[in-house]
Image (spheres, rainbow, N blue to C red):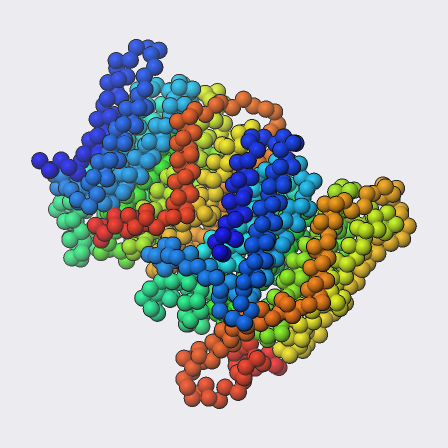
Amino acid sequence: MNNFAATIPILIVALSAIAAMLAEAFRQPGERMPIAGLGLIGLAGAAIASCFLWDTDAQSFGVVRADNFALFINLILCTIGILTMVFSVDVVEREELPEGEYYALTLFAISGMMLMAAATDLLVIFLALEVLSLAVYVLTAIRRSSVAAAEAGFKYFLLGSLSSAFFLYGIAFAFAIAGSTRLDQIGTEMASGPSATLALLSVGLLAVGFAFKVSAVPFHMWTPDAYEGAPTIVTAFMSTGVKAAAFAAFVRVFLSTLEPLQSNWVPILSAIAAVTMIVGTVVGVLQSNIKRMLAYSSIAHAGYLLLGIIAANSSGKAAVLFYLLAYAVANLGALGIVALLGTADRPHDQLRDFAGLWSTRPGLAALMTVFLLSLGGFPPTAGFIAKWYIFAAAVQEGHYTLTIIAVLSSVVSVFFYLRIVVMMYMTEEPAAQPRPRVSVPAMAGLAFAMLATFYLGVLPTRVIDYALQSIQTIF
Amino acid sequence: MLSLIVFLPLAGALVVLLAGGRGDRPERESIVKGLALAVSVVTFLATLYLWWRFDPLNADFQFIENRPWLPQFGIAYHLGVDGISLFLIVLTGFLTPLAMMSSWSVHKSVKLFSFFLLALETAMLGVFVSLDLFLFYVFWDAMLIPMYFLIGIWGYERRIYAAVKFILYTMAGSVLMLVAIIGLAYAHSAATGQPSFNLLDLYGVRLSDTVETWFFLAFTVAFAIKVPLFPFHTWLPDAHVEAPTAGSVILAGVLLKMGTYGLLRFSFPLFPHAAAEWAPVLAVLAVIGIIYGALVAMVQPDLKKLVAYSSVSHLGFVVLGLCSSTVNGVQGAVYQMLNHGVSTGGLFMVVGMLSDRRHTRLISEFGGLKAVVPRLVAAFLLITLSSIALPGMNGFIGEFLILLGAFRWHPRLAALAATGVILSAVYMLWMFQRVNYGEVTNEKNRRLPDLSPREWALMVPTVAAAILMGVLPGVFLRPMEPSVVRTLDRINSAPASRTENRLGPSNLGSRTPDLAPRTKGRSPRSGATSHE
């Protein structure tokens, strides 16, 4: 009976996704239905279920394990999902996205992400990866009439499939070594000194697969196009959710199963991390489209997160979790504002669209500033503590060079975050442009994200404690 | 007590932001300004109360507050004040209301302006009272944001460039310091098994030579950019010139002091050995800064730029005094920090008044002002004299002590630095003459109004402070002395224990005479080279 326990949060989200689809099926054309509400109920339920499962270390079918690590990621994903839902209400209606499909796909993607974080079998991880990827591919291209969206979706799909192939190939080699796809068995085999070639091939291919999903350089090519072409709210969702899920699996596979081979993969990942941070920030400086800019910023953030994996100590693992949370609220907030200001015919995603925002919408400008400062890593926001935590973990292991690259690239990144601030506060608006109103729930969501940003920045102790508890199972 | 002082302005800032509803209607403007001014005045009174309660004979940190913040990493909310930081806190409290008043002519979104100014005050006070390196860094970095907005929104023509340059320049230096801070905390953890960011714990950490040098450089570059020490000074003229008057006053008055404060509180005592080794280099850079700043100031056509470059020169003296590691030199340096805050802050206020009246800051646009606005010129004269260190004014005490200390350490450098005193008289008096004496050459200057009551309220405290500090230096120097001596003990005694560690006791014996108290400030090794 207890066999199901670990999958309960995932099932709740999947059920709400099915409910959303059913609701859409029964909807009369033109009738308004609070489908987002269904999603909110499901996500809240999943969050509560995750809280109840805390410390129980429930396992289902031997391949899904709701340890504290998975549950922490679940809570991050629920936060992401709830914020996305809240922002979507405005956006979906205004941009005339197909309502039922949109919510159902988002919820299915979240259930895939949760499964990915909890899976303890490479094949299940792959399954989860496909569930979430397929949903996100479709979401990217959900604006059927838009050429850019179609291009983005197609590009994302092709490159994503390629990375899935790599990943699958890596699983095959792991199976060749261990005779199983279970993470614990592979871990045992890896520790006992397997054939070096096979092991390296397996590690390398898995790393490539993950690197695609977290958009690390040189596997980042799809990111700017997909982020730019997708509806902004989808960009907000996938830049945080996919990253959280992929990093969760990345940490679990590399820091528990493949930990014995650490000396092999640390140099590879170090090189990837360094290039990722540099390319993400330097190319980000050149962008004039905010979504592309934040796409490159998300690449750079992937680099910082990799630093936590490279450090491979308990601080590093906990730091990755904390960072994912801090990044999720700040990035969702920032992209959420972009989405909320956009309309179907005017996406409001160019830098100059933000000129003079502060004089017409001081509240939104202030919120945007807080999120950007958090992404840039300024105290007293969450981003500062998160960056500091990652850097501390890396310094603790003596990775000084990487840390110095990281801090300097974060200075460069401040430059482009501030470009938006300059636009909002210090540039006059050429002509008063109508900007859509922001509904109360969306405003509440933004306010929540801001409070979370400050809470994590000023009083992070409790969350760090939870993060430290979470990673005890993945040694 | 300290928390109250630090966060009072921030609380006031939030009240200001919420008060008065949306938008900037003119009738609300004076309420907002008045409220912000009241908050800053109350904060100033609180800092005076702090001074009154301060025990001047005690070298320890006082008014300690120590609560765990991130106990997992040994990070605490740890505040305290000693004789060095005490006066910088009072200075911050003193200058913020003045800056507030000096920007009475700001009419663009006054609410936000007051908010940022008060938030900035919290961050500045926080920097001076933090005894935990992590907390210090939080305040240090947080301070950049309000200053960035002050320059960027309310500045002059090239404000955006100046604001971005300011923030990137400062950050580039300080992130490396962050790495060093983390490294230091883990060095403590390697020694004791427990990471700690507590400054007092970290004073005792021993590092290998290379690591110490790297960490020292990381800290020192961050502070040197802030000071700014030549050749890291290029952000300063831009930021100063483009900032609104309040921004310039705070920037010159307080922000630059954070650099020198950081050197004295962190760089030197945390890494005494590396500091001793590098002190001559820093001192040479400081002397270059003194002379270079003065020469460049001399040829500036713009009043604000002139004052900005004079800051480079004056702060060179402070760094020189710190490098001398003598009681006189360091006391003079701290005193000069305060002087510079008062006199340069005052100069920027005067320039602000002139530029409010004429909307230009070019020296050539003025001339013969003495006949038109005698009272303003009188105040201008007193502040100018204080800036060029006339005996009887505050600047004299500071520069004299610095040169005294520096002379005992390194006569040649001191002699070179002394030319800076003369040069400063040259450029300041020449500027003063061109602006205020002679015939009124420009017709626009004929009908300028003299000091308004608000400007009286700005000038009187500034001039009074300048004279008071010149006449009664003991009031300030006495509470400072125990802490300065304590800090110097940290700087100067550490090389001995390190030497013992590295070379063994037998070597130490032969070296001891070199390390006789108060003559040194350098390890045996660098002492030998610097005497050549």
Residue A228 is situated, as x and y percent measured from the top left of the image, at: 43, 31
Q: Dividing the picture into quarters, in which one does residue B254 lie?
A: bottom right
Residue sitting farthest toward the left: A1
Report whether residue A243 is seen.
yes
A454 vs A209, nearest the viewer = A454
Q: Is residue A400 left or right of residue A22?
A: right
B429 vs B168, nearest the viewer = B429
Q: Is residue A160 left or right of residue B454?
A: left
**Considering only vertical position in the picture, is A41 above or below A209?**
above
Q: Is residue A430 left or right of residue A1?
A: right
Q: Tag count in the figure? A: 0
Q: Residue at x 41, y 41 (%)?
A: A453
Residue B35 is situated, as x and y percent measured from the top left of the image, at: 60, 41
Q: Residue at x 27, y 27 (%)?
A: A41
**Considering only vertical position in the picture, is A248 above or below A270?**
above
**Considering only vertical position in the picture, is A466 above or below B225?**
above
Q: Is residue A362 left or right of residue B430?
A: left
